Image: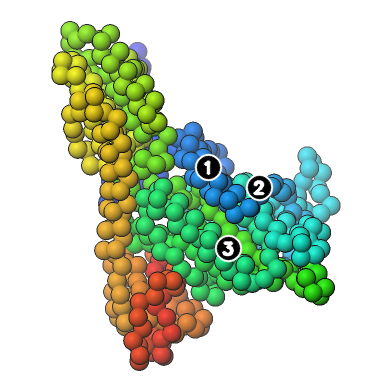
Amino acid sequence: MATNNAKASNAKKKEVKKETKLGLTYKKDENFGEWYSEVVVSSEMIEYYDISGCYILRPWTMAIWETLQVFFDAQIKKMNIKNAYFPLFVTENVLQKEKDHIEGFAPEVAWVTKSGQTDLEVPIAIRPTSETVMYPYFSKWIRGHRDLPLKVNQWCNVVRWEFSHPTPFIRSREFLWQEGHTAFATKAEADEEVLQILELYRRIYEEFLAIPVIKGQKSELEKFAGGLYTTSVEAFIPNTGRGIQGATSHCLGQNFAKMFQINFENDKGEKAMVWQNSWAYSTRTLGVMVMVHGDDKGLVLPPRVASIQVIVIPVPYKDADVTAIKAACETTVQTLSNAGFSAELDTRENYSPGWKYSHWEMKGVPLRIEIGPKDLEKNQVRVVRRDNGAKIDVPVNDLVEKVKELLGSIQESLFNAAKEKRDACIKVVNTWDEFIAALNDKNMILAPWCDEEEVEKDVKARTKGELGAAKTLCTPFDQPRLAEGTLCFASGKPAKKWTYWGRSY
């Protein structure tokens, strides 16, 4: 009986501990992978699902995704791009039509082979991307030059199945994205749009998520399978020394037009093939945000994407006028809400103010306002910043102006801190030995390159190891001067360009 009581007591202790323990077990600088997994769950961004590589995106995540969606959707509508929706399924014969393209996705394609207990006569693929889903219908809709440009976008999910290390947001089997697909009469129009879209992706990362990115072009080896060329925005995670492809904008050229016979009669009455683009960003953006800004207390949200920008917490000490404090808190929330800020009040009575501080820090809310008896007396509130923990007492009359100033400062500080950390990890090298030293030191490397595919493959082969091989990340549009006589760091041949290299996600 005593043993049973002891067991029950221990079980209760464990249960209570689980309920009250808010701090993270892992530190960002010591065990990054475990820290990241813990943060995305403890901050209530995701919940693990019973199918490996699939995750539940909780409201805290969806609110951020919707903020980015509202911005991007409005911008592409200004470009006269219309939203559509295409089916999730694609037949095998259509999928196989564009050989290079499907080879690039082949290991990741998930197939439906049964309906109930009956085997399907023909297996059906679940879209890994929608070029082959859409383009048979582009050929039907485009007949003459007046049908161009054709510009559609869809907000949807895609499934990419095979990989070894699923990571929430960064590499999941199902994820959300937008994918734009456009067709033009001329290459010049397609080229122009590729860069317009890439600039919107830069704005998502830099202006909303406060993450610095590099705009550039992918190598032939790293470009989108079946495309003409790929441009991307590249981010970097200093803690792991890995680059991460943030979003891509591809010029597909006329390859898919040829395969799917997307032809039109031009204004001279001649038959011509369209020029096509496709472009996408996904929920991966949110994983990059967590990795870049998060700290040992949890998530840190940039104010522009935080669904709650200010959390107001009553701090009723012993014998305090609880009613007056609560009324002051409610007035504060109302004042901030009326001024256009997203503010909420945490009135839960079963948690202490200290617990609430930790809870909202874990969730990354940019500003916390505390109101206690002394604040009531002085007609002020205490404001605490999430990014640096700074505390400031603000007179009630100045609150709206001060909150606006602080949120702007947090957004800017997060970007500047991230850029400083990223820039400290960029190393310019000229030789192989310098390259290896910089790579092993977790850097993003800018090196002169001869732009030969065989050399790129050789670099991958020579750097293959437990941490993964180095590869080209992108050739930046903003090219440093290439002095005459500069040689490729890997081959010793004359260099043609500066390119970023590194390990990547």
Q: Quadrant of residue 117?
A: top right
In this rendering, would 369 be left or right of 499?
left
Residue at mark 2 to residue at mark 1: CA–CA distance: 13 Å
Report which residue position mark 1 lands on.
70
Who's the residue at 25% across and 10% down the image?
A: 324
In the displayed structure, 265 sits above or below 64; it is below
Who's the residue at 52% across and 64% down the image?
A: 195
Query: Of callouts 3 and 1, which one flags the residue occurring earlier in the amino acid sequence?
Result: 1
Give the position of the C terminus as an image quadrant.
Answer: bottom left
Residue 272 is situated, as x and y percent measured from the top left of the image, at 77, 73
Q: Is mark 3 on a helix, strand or loop?
A: helix
- Residue 446 makes an appearance in the image: yes
- Tell me whether circle 2 and circle 3 mark residues in contact (CB < 8 Å): no
Who's the residue at 27% across and 58% down the image?
A: 420
Report which residue position mark 2 lands on.
83
Kind of residue sitting beneath label 1:
Val
Give the position of the N terminus as an image quadrant.
Answer: top left
Kind of residue sitting beneath label 2:
Asn
Indicate which disc residue 193 carries. 3
Q: How crowded is mark 3: few (under 14 residues within 10 Å), some or many (20 or more)?
A: many
Q: What element carries label 2?
A: strand
Kind of residue sitting beneath label 3:
Glu
Q: What element carries label 1?
A: helix
Residue at mark 3 to residue at mark 1: CA–CA distance: 20 Å
Query: Of callouts 2 and 3, which one flags the residue occurring earlier in the amino acid sequence?
Result: 2
Residue 20 is situated, as x and y percent measured from the top left of the image, at 31, 25
